[in-house]
Every structure is written in structure tokens, then in C-alpha cells.
Image (cartoon, rainbow, N blue to C red):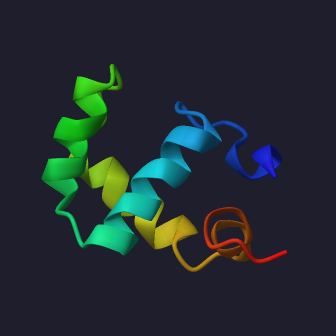
Amino acid sequence: MMSDFKGRHFGGKVILWAVQWYCRYSMSYRDLKTMLAERGSSVNHSTIYQWVQRYASAPLYEETMMGKH
């Protein structure tokens, strides 16, 4: 699972957390940027956009965050 995030600056948990919140609660990328900053991660909103484009429809996201096994 985490090999899908190899070479990323942020860990898979941070990326999937942001993607999950964006998809589940229809938050803006800038709101997520603020939430991550409050938790100690400085992420640009365009980076979050790229994460959503890459991981939101991936089977990894569905299995990990949506509870499919």
C-alpha cells in the first residue's frame, strides 16, 4: 500500500486524509491547506488538487478509506 506513495514528500496517511476529507465533505483545497497547516503540515492547495486527481479514484483509496476489502 505505502509503495504507492514512494518518493512523495508527505506520507500516505497525510495524502489519503486530505483526499478523504475533500471527497467526503466537499471542502475547498484552500480549506484543506489550512487544516493541514494547523496539524503541522505545510501543503500548497495545488498539491492537494494533484493528490485528489491521482488518488481519489484509485483502488487504493477505495480499499483504504471506503472500507472495501
- Residue 55 in percent (x, y) is at 56, 66
**Residue extending furthest toward the front:** 67
Relative placement, left or right, of 12 versus 32 is right
Q: Quadrant of residue 25?
A: bottom left
* Depicted 30 relative to depicted 64: above or below: above
- Residue 15 in percent (x, y) is at 51, 47
Quadrant position of the C terminus in the picture = bottom right
Q: Name the residue rendered at 33%, 65% in the picture.
A: 22
Total number of numbered discs in the rendering: 0
Residue nearest the observer in this picture, 14 or 67: 67
Q: Name the residue rendered at 15%, 50% in the picture.
A: 31
Q: Name the residue rendered at 57%, 80% in the picture.
A: 57
* Depicted 63 relative to depicted 49: above or below: below
- Residue 60 in percent (x, y) is at 72, 67
Relative placement, left or right, of 56 versus 44 is right
- Residue 1 in percent (x, y) is at 81, 52
Relative placement, left or right, of 62 versus 52 is right
Residue nearest the observer in this picture, 55 or 40: 40
Q: Name the residue rendered at 62%, 73% in the picture.
A: 66
